[in-house]
Image (cartoon, coloured by chain):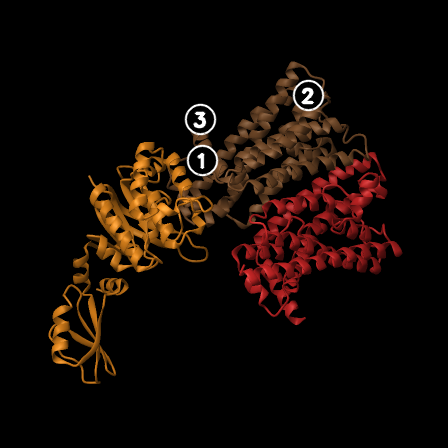
Chain colours: A red, B brown, C orange
């Protein structure tokens, strides 16, 4: 356990050294936050309770989206991209011989990174958003708790998907194609482009059931208080389910990959 | 200029040939490029399942804005997008090598690793634009203006790409700031600017003239009143703005190169 | 007229928080067509900076440079056609492309006459042994193979001058030898002017009749290699392993510098042959083994600069 903590801490420190890049990223987050907020405000002006939200909820949703963007590495990156690189260079063979499980190792590293991004590129743009717009904030400590748990689960789900995509490098020479497709799916089904609450009919229902709904929509609904009590637990439950299923898939696939690497010599 | 284009084409052709070595990956990326830009329009379509107009523009009209901006941006990205890697080229010493070769620097930087697969983004935006155009009430002048607009918008985005990339002559870490202007510029011009406060519209007219990418011309083509009440000839100003921005971008590039050659890496 | 003329060349760098650094200070020299010049000096002496200014990458702070009658900082593209550059640590080739594609791209870039390009390519491929490597992506080549590729690439357009920045670094002995042979032939048959920066004294000895020593940004010596050793008073060392320990060896023409048990280090002038010293030692003492150490270029320069 302490080893994983150490890995997480080292990862946090590593990302914290990129001051200029972080500041530049915060700027970009803010610009897109403003643009998206204004677009949604125009929508809600026409349809004041679209998707069961009011305009303040919608704007808050946008800024939460920007906050989650880097935390869960929506555009890819984080520890799994290190894995992909190591697979390509063959260094991953060494990872299999370490006393710590690969999955735990990379997850710890990603948690460390996510913690840094949450604090820097999550918190700061949200504060900027709060200054420029009227935002809704969680109504009580239980809501904060539910939100925090949701963010952690979202990270696990995102990590698992990125890890699975990275592992395709074991079998496919050039994983750029799978990366782009995965990012596209994440961008759309996370609700970053458009909140899932606006998705019409059965399409919306389907989207809410997919793992990507964990990324932004689930934490946002908890933060905004749109899901409370048992409904909130259901949201968290679905996130947990996806996290478990996807992480199990990672572990399974890892076993298959290990056989390939260790037996065939990579 | 023509000379530069020829050299560009020669270099680009070789990269296209090299990409044929990985056909599956290439095909996936072509599809991926189409999809990743396509979801932006699907997003807009979804918005319109909840409202009938945005800032006084209906779906077809917003599609027109999206399409003109999208096509121009995708063309600019195809030909000049690689300049985003300027910092990396400098760090790896590749920029020094380019300085030793008898080809204009800008041509070398932009043609480097030319990726033809990005045409799928142009195709995607063009499809949306084509669809939007079926709803427009055409006249000869409107056709002319539309064509002019796409060309001018492309030049504006090219200028943005080049100008913003020059940040990397001085700081490589802050390179992401450029994205807020290039990709942000594309995002903003995909919507009617009436959804933004009038201060923003004024900034985008006089300070960072993104409103000339497609907004002002669209007022003419789609038959809308200018919310700020500007004279009609502003709607034909895009080519002038584009030329001005191109000059500025080239100057910034020159300054950047001179600075690099005076301080080394 | 000299092919390369450098006069009063100065290049200062501003460093944050510290006083400005004069990487090159009032440098003056000239190189005639067909010369093979070794450009040596300790790390940080200003070698790379000079090459960068000669090739037009860097602009001088003051002073003048004329290469083939042209100012490199002003006429970059015009000059680029007439020079070739090989950077030892970074490749000039395109990482992901097969070697053959890199060469083809270069023909387009330099606008070399296609027939001339083909002829050059055929010759270099044979001389440098690149035949089997043409279809390999550059990133899969070994260091030695890549270096040979780089050299071919730099010469395909018939440059008048070839700059080589540490070309043999990291190469094994056989590769180094082959490379030196190739460069010698190049100079002899085509009259290509060579300017070579290196730390390897053997490179200099094999290739360069003229040596330019730079230290702290200025020329410290400009002349022949033999003259350099003579002026620097550099010495070669004979390491003798005696069968038994004994007092310091005494032979004419050499002095004992150090004794450690049965091993003794004798130094003698660098431009003298080792043979008389060796036979004197072997004749007068019981020797188990011996070897000769060449003077380190750093020692040579240090000696030179201290004078």
Q: Nearer the viewer, mark 1 or mark 3?
A: 1
| Residue B215 left/right relative to B106 | right
| Residue B244 left/right relative to A222 | left
Inspect this view and state whether residue C280 appears: yes
Dot 2 or dot 1, earlier in sequence: 1
How many C-alpha atoms fall within 10 Å of the one at disc 3: few (<14), some, or many (≥20)? few
Quarter of the figure that contains the N terminus of chain B: top left
Of residues B253 and C142, the one drawn nearer to the viewer in this rendering? C142
* Distance from Cα at disc 2 to Cα at disc 1: 38 Å
* Distance from Cα at disc 3 to Cα at disc 2: 32 Å
Dot 1 or dot 3, earlier in sequence: 3
Q: Nearer the viewer, mark 3 or mark 2?
A: 3
Q: Given the image, what chain letter belongs to the residue carrying mark 1?
A: B
Q: Nearer the viewer, mark 2 or mark 1?
A: 1
Tell me what residue is drawn at x 64 percent, y 50 percent: A76
Q: Position of residue B242 (x, y in %)?
A: 56, 28
The secondary structure type at the circle numbered 1 is helix
Residue highlighted by disc 3: B2
Tell me what residue is drawn at x 60 percent, y 64 percent: A10
| Residue B2 left/right relative to B124 | left
How many C-alpha atoms fall within 10 Å of the one at disc 2: few (<14), some, or many (≥20)? many
How many C-alpha atoms fall within 10 Å of the one at disc 1: few (<14), some, or many (≥20)? many
Tell me what residue is drawn at x 80 percent, y 60 percent: A145
| Residue C38 left/right relative to C102 | left
Up the image or down, C264 lies above or below B100; here it is below
Residue highlighted by disc 2: B221
Residue B11: numbered disc: 1
- Label 3 with label 2: CB-CB less than 8 Å: no
State the image quarter where residue A103 is shown. Answer: bottom right
The secondary structure type at the circle numbered 3 is helix
Dot 3 or dot 2, earlier in sequence: 3
Q: Position of residue B63 (x, y in %)?
A: 71, 29
């Amino acid at each position: 356990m302490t080893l994983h903590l150490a890995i997480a801490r080292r990862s946090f420190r590593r990302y914290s050294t990129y001051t200029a890049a972080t500041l530049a990223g915060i700027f970009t987050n803010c610009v897109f936050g403003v643009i998206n907020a204004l677009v949604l405000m125009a929508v809600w002006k026409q349809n004041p309770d679209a998707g069961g939200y009011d305009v303040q909820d919608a704007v808050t949703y946008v800024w939460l989206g920007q906050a989650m963007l880097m935390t869960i590495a929506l555009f890819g990156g984080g520890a799994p991209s290190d894995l992909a690189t190591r697979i390509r260079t063959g260094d991953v063979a060494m990872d299999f011989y370490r006393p710590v499980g690969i999955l735990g190792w990379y997850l710890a590293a990603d948690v460390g990174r996510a913690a840094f991004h949450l604090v820097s590129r999550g918190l700061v743009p949200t504060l900027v958003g709060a200054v420029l717009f009227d935002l809704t904030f969680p109504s009580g400590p239980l809501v904060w708790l539910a939100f925090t748990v949701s963010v952690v689960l979202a990270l696990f789900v995102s990590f698992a998907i990125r890890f699975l995509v990275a592992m395709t490098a074991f079998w496919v020479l050039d994983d750029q194609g799978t990366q782009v497709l995965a990012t596209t799916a994440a961008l759309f089904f996370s609700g970053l482009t458009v909140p899932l609450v606006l998705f019409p009919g059965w399409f919306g229902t389907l989207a809410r059931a997919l793992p990507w709904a964990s990324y932004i929509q689930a934490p946002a609904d908890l933060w905004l208080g749109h899901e409370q009590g048992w409904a909130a637990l259901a949201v968290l439950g679905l996130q947990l389910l996806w996290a478990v299923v996807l992480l199990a898939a990672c572990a399974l696939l890892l076993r298959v990959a290990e056989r390939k690497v260790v037996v065939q010599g990579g | 200029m023509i000379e530069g284009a020829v050299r560009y084409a020669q270099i680009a052709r070789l990269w296209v040939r090299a990409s044929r070595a990985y056909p599956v990956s290439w095909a996936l990326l072509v599809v991926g490029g189409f999809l990743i830009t396509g979801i932006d329009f699907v997003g807009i379509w979804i918005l319109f399942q909840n409202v009938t107009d945005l800032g006084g523009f209906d779906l077809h009209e917003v599609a027109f804005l999206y399409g003109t901006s999208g096509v121009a941006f995708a063309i600019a990205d195809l030909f000049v997008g690689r300049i985003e890697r300027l910092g990396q080229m400098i760090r790896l010493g590749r920029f020094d090598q380019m300085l030793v070769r008898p080809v204009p620097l800008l041509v070398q930087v932009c043609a480097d690793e030319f990726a033809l697969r990005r045409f799928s983004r142009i195709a995607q935006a063009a499809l949306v634009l084509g669809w939007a155009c079926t709803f427009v009430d055409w006249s000869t002048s409107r056709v002319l203006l539309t064509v002019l607009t796409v060309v001018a918008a492309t030049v504006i985005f090219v200028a943005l790409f080049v100008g913003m990339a020059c940040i990397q002559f001085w700081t490589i870490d802050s390179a992401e700031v450029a994205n807020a202007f290039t990709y942000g510029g594309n995002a903003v011009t995909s919507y009617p600017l009436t959804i933004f406060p009038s201060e923003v519209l004024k900034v985008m007219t006089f300070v960072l003239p993104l409103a000339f990418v497609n907004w002002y011309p669209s007022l003419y083509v789609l038959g809308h009143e200018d919310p700020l009440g500007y004279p009609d000839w502003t709607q034909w100003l895009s080519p002038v703005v584009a030329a001005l921005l191109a000059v500025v971008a080239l100057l910034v590039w020159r300054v950047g190169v001179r600075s690099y050659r005076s301080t080394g890496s | 007229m000299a092919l390369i003329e450098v006069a009063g060349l100065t290049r200062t760098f501003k460093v944050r928080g510290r006083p400005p650094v004069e990487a090159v200070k009032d440098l003056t020299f000239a190189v005639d067509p067909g010369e093979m010049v070794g450009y040596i000096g300790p790390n940080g002496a200003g070698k790379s900076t000079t090459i960068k200014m000669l090739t037009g990458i860097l602009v001088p702070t003051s002073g003048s440079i004329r290469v083939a009658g042209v100012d490199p900082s002003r006429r970059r593209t015009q000059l680029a056609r007439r020079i070739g550059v090989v950077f030892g640590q970074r490749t000039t080739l395109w990482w992901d492309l097969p070697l053959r594609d890199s060469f083809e791209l270069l023909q387009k870039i330099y606008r070399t006459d296609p027939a001339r390009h083909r002829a050059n390519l055929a010759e270099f491929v044979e001389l440098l042994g690149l035949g089997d490597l043409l279809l390999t992506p550059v990133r899969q080549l070994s260091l030695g193979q890549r270096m040979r590729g780089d050299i071919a690439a730099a010469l395909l357009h018939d440059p008048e001058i070839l700059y080589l920045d540490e070309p043999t670094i990291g190469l094994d002995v056989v590769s180094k030898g082959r490379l030196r042979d190739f460069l010698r032939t190049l100079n002899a048959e085509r009259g290509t002017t060579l300017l070579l920066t290196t730390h390897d004294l053997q490179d200099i000895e094999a290739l360069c009749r003229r040596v330019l020593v730079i230290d702290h940004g200025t020329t410290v010596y400009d002349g022949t290699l033999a003259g350099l050793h003579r002026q620097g008073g550099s010495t070669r060392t004979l390491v003798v392993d005696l069968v038994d320990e004994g007092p310091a060896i005494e032979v004419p023409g050499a002095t004992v510098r150090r004794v450690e048990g049965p091993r003794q280090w004798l130094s003698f002038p660098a431009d003298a042959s080792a043979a008389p010293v060796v036979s004197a030692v072997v004749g007068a003492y019981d020797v188990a083994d011996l070897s000769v150490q060449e003077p380190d270029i750093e020692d040579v320069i240090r000696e030179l600069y201290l004078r």
